[in-house]
Image (tube, rainbow, N blue to C red):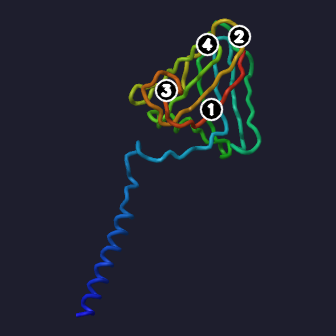
Amino acid sequence: MKNFKSINTIKLLAVLFMSSIAFVSCSSDDDDHDDHDHEEELITTVLYTLTSPTGFVTIEFQDLDGAGGADGTYDVSGPLSANTTYTGVIKLLNETEDPAEDITLEVEEEGDEHEFFYTPSISDITITKEDADVDGNPIGIETTFTTGEAGTGTLTIELIHEPTKPNDGTSASAGGSTDVEVTFSIEVQ
């Protein structure tokens, strides 16, 4: 009788052990894509190109060794023209890869989970996001950038992951987490 109880106990423990393995191995790795963990991409370069009928200006941040190494560089190719409308396109790259990985493609593909925010300190600048995600909410890869009178100030560009959409157009109201944030000195003349 004693051996019978031991055998039953061993069988019960074996069944419980196998059930726990099955439970762990069946945890859902196929969750809906909206619930997946955000795997942060390395963004070494932010390139914002503004094109008008009379020329273009590039605004670029580059940090080829990533966070924690040498400081990144900020470059604006020239002043913006006053009272001018530019077509803007932003591009994010990981230049540690060869060839460079275009992170913008992923941002566009996952547009419902991303949004760019452009914050100029010059009050005469208006930036309108021209592209939208599948729900009709703005992404901000493509923009219309309109200058007013001459002035100097800054332009902050942020990419927010999983922002509240719709929002009031500011990163402060969007929540989410920051994938990239860079601030440039700009001049309108």
Residue 49 coordinates in the image, percent (x, y): 64, 24
- Name which of mark 2 and mark 1 comes first in the sequence: 2
C-alpha distance separating marks 4 and 1: 19 Å
- Label 2 residue SS: strand
Quickly name the residue at label 4: 125
- Name which of mark 3 and mark 2 comes first in the sequence: 2
Q: Is residue 63 left or right of residue 178?
A: right
Tell me which residue sits at (67%, 42%) in the image.
95
Quickly name the residue at label 1: 181
Quickly name the residue at label 3: 173
Q: Given contact means CB atoms under 8 Å apart, are the residues at marks 3 and 1 in contact?
A: no
- Name which of mark 4 and mark 1 comes first in the sequence: 4
Tell me which residue sits at (49%, 29%) in the image.
174
Asked if 160 appears above or below 51 in the picture, the reply is below
Label 2 Cα neighbours within 10 Å, binned few <14 / some 14-19 / many ≥20: some
Viewer-nearest of labels 3 and 1?
3
Asked if 22 appears above or below 71 in the picture, the reply is below
Q: Identify which amino acid the numbered label 4 is placed on.
A: Ile
Quickly name the residue at label 2: 151
Q: Quadrant of residue 136?
A: top left
Q: Identify which amino acid the numbered label 3 is placed on.
A: Ser
- Name which of mark 3 and mark 1 comes first in the sequence: 3
- Name which of mark 4 and mark 2 comes first in the sequence: 4
Q: Identify which amino acid the numbered label 1 is placed on.
A: Glu
Residue lying furthest right: 70
140 vs 71, nearest the viewer: 71
Q: Given contact means CB atoms under 8 Å apart, are the residues at marks 4 and 1 in contact?
A: no
Q: In which quarter of the image is residue 186?
A: top right
Residue 68 coordinates in the image, percent (x, y): 71, 45
Viewer-nearest of labels 3 and 2?
3
